[in-house]
Image (cartoon, helix red, strand yellow):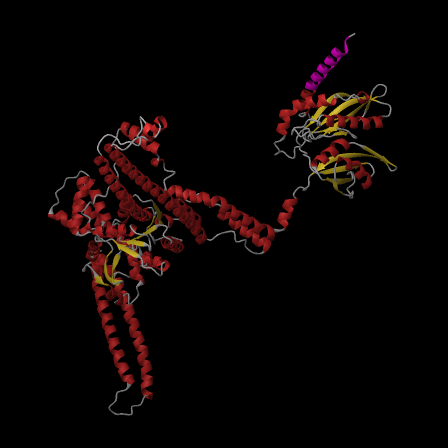
Amino acid sequence: MYSRTAFNLAARNLRSLSHRTRRIHTSIRVFTDTPETASTSESKLDGNSRERWLFIDSVFPIRLGIWDLRHYIGILREENLLERLHERLETVKTHDFYIRELKPYQKDGGVFVRFTYTARDHQNALDTLQKDLQLEANKHGGLPSWSGLNYCNVWLVKGEPFLEDMYRYPSGIVHVSFQGPDVPEEALYSLFRPCGRIYNITAPTPVPAGTLRSSDILFHRVRSATVARNTIHGHAFSDDGGTTRLRTAYQHPIQAHAIRDWLTSHPRIVLPIIFFLLGTLTYTIFDPIRVLSVEGKMLNWFDYHEYKLYKWLRANALDRFSLTSVAREDVSPQGDIWKERKDAESAVRSYLSDLPSTVAFVHGPQGSGKSRMLDTIIRDTGRKALVIDCAELNRATSDTRLVSALAQQTGYRPIFTFLNSVDNLVDIATVGLIGQKAGFKSSLEDQLKQILEITGTALKKVNHSLRTSAQRAVKAAQDADKRQAEEARTRARIRAGTWHDPRLDCIAGNGIISELGVGDELLEGDDSGFASFDAMEKDVVNSSGRWEELAKQQRRNVEDVQAVRTLPIVVIKNYATRGGVYKEELLGVLAHWAASLTENQIAHVIVVSDNRENAKLLARALPSKPLNSIALYDADAPTALSFVRRCLHDAGVTLDLTPAQQKAIECLGGRTSDLERLIHKVCSSQGIEEAVEDIIASGVGELRKKTFGEDIDDDKSLPCSRERTVPKQLARKAELPYYEVLLDAPFKGDELPLRAMEHAEIICISTQHGRPSTIRPGKPVFKYVFERLVGDPVFQATQDIMLNEKLISSAESTVRTCESELSMLQDLSKAERSFWWFRRRVTSERKEYLLKKMRSAQIKIQTLEKRNSELKRVLAKGA
């Protein structure tokens, strides 16, 4: 016979092996097609032995959904928890209690225990056994659990254990189906109440044929629902009406599509809330990101060329191994010879040297060097600049592209332009649902204002960041000066012999007993040396006080200067460029934004335009302050010649200009674009006279297209088709009086055609004392272009004939008007009486005036018709 100890040890090893084997089988059962279902909750064995099931709750965390990650804790601690649970339960020997199997059910957080017992009165035995198990657990501080709180309870399974691996996660509602007659509410309450507190029990409702009737039981806690689900499932309830088998399942608190149905049925409440939340999300999340993005663009955070590592690699690696020389920076070749720009450049620098109070409006003809001058100033001052080019913005063909282009130039990211189409669909949908638009779509003006508002906020931060850095640098310089002064004072004391290192006192002690430090006794030397040193030290103290006062005054001055130098610069180029679809909205928004930046002293704003008339929008945005208008003009003839010589010398072209070549260059005037075009042609091995002739010929074609069009239809539709007389007059004179041309035919007081010519850069209108004064060619070369057009007899004859036809039509209209009025006066003269024989009648005076006017108009008609006949003969000869 084997000893009892050896038998117990073998049984324990067998149970451990059986437990590991069951773990493997359990993990395999999770992936089988059909879940495991125990056939019955009680199995009859030999004699009085029976087999039943227990359910122990809260051993593992209850998994509330697929997103609940706590079950991984249970997976990691499963083996340890099951071993401890087995050791804790096997100590109970009531009614030959013996554990046969442990089945973990982690989804519901419990463990099923299959056990055997021996008893005659099975019901009393089960109650006693359950109490003993609970007492034994309480004696050891409770059963083990995943959280370590040991608050697990032991429950006797009344039905059939149903372990499944479907996506049916626990909830506080247990759906009980009746496989048989309905169970009364009182019976359900008494059956389920031991599992936990119950909120409500619903009554069975009528169901279609073939469907089980059911009730829903709402528990206070999910833990109670899991106990009820796993202990009562499959329980057979018997009463006088028959036997009913209960089937339990979890019911989610919210039915499928309940939220969706409620949201779709209450659009008046839901849509405003959604729009409010989206706006809040944009304001709290995306706006700070956009401010940071604009700030990064201004401070070159995202430009790798500004990184120290890249600069070091460029200086020490790339430039050394490069086969070509490093291109130098583009330095303006004018030097000191471009005298006409000095005044404009000094005016811009003066504007940038003070706090902004207005907008600087830089205007001048195209090609006069406005952009190059501003680039040079910004590069010399080292200021941070934000450039907005209206020419690129005006190329946008839709509001979405315009917003994207402005965001690209300002660094405004992220931007969701595709939402404009979505907003249109939302407005259409809301009109059908609630009868009005949701108002979620913003207008183009609002979108542009939002981008510029975020940009203004970023400019404030850039100013603050630069000012902080500047103050930090100033403070560091002042601290360095203080350290130098203190070092000078220390050196003076060392030379006088009265300075010692106080750290030696820690070693040598203090006072007269000091051997290495300085004690109370005097050092070697006479007293006069110390008296002189005391006076010197007093002078040093006095000078240090004066130095501190000077330092404070200097600090204030430096802070004032830094407050101006750290302001960013906003440059708006090509303001009021032609051809923009959204020109008015864009320019209006930019004008008000520029005014707000200067009024709040956030940045210096420089607006660059080709025409002074474009300043009207800016003037309306700043009604109380005048604009700082800065004009650029063409250079004079000597400066233009010097510029050409300098540029040709820099390009490696050695050429001595002859008088004929100098005269040819003077035909181009001082326009930078034309002079640079000449230089490119000369560098391409073309002669100066030939290059000038090409420029004049291309100007003739350009002027014909702008003024007269390519055919008759263009001639009628172009706004400049009426101004044929102005080029003809400018071919003979360098400039024309503005008001004389305005009041003469064919304008007769209409300024719009002249403004159209100015915008087309055919003419240039100069001002004097704020009013138009003279009319000059739009480019200096246009004077010779006008001469070329007037010198063409066929073209000039065609234009004169067309103009004469209009004048003849006007004169004939005058004759017809006079004839009609004369016939009316003839009737009035019969009724008119004269009381005095020497007094003339009024109608007689009016008749004489009309007859003179008719005679003048008739003579004009005859003269013009005769002139047209001569011109037609010229055309016949030219053909």
Give the dominant element type of the magenta stretch: helix, strand or loop.
Answer: helix
- Side (left or right) of 690 relative to 601: left
Q: Where is residue 150 in the image (x, y as percent from the top left)?
A: 69, 29
- Side (left or right) of 315 relative to 98: left
Q: Give the range drawn in magenta.
A: 2-21
Q: Identify the residue at the far left of this view.
A: 659
On whether residue 5 falls in the magenta region, the answer is yes
Q: Position of residue 648 (x, y in %)?
A: 18, 41
Vertical placement of residue 643 versus 859, above or below: above
Q: Which of 382 and 282 is in front in this view?
A: 382
Vertical placement of residue 135 versus 739, above or below: above
Q: Position of residue 480 (x, y in %)?
A: 30, 38
Query: Residue 686, can we see it?
Result: no
**Residue at (38%, 49%) from the top-left corner?**
393
Q: Where is residue 135 in the image (x, y as percent from the top left)?
A: 76, 27
Vertical placement of residue 352 versus 328, above or below: below
Rendering quarter of residue 788? bottom left
Quadrant the C terminus occupies: bottom left
Quadrant the N terminus occupies: top right
Q: Identify the residue at the far top of this view.
A: 1
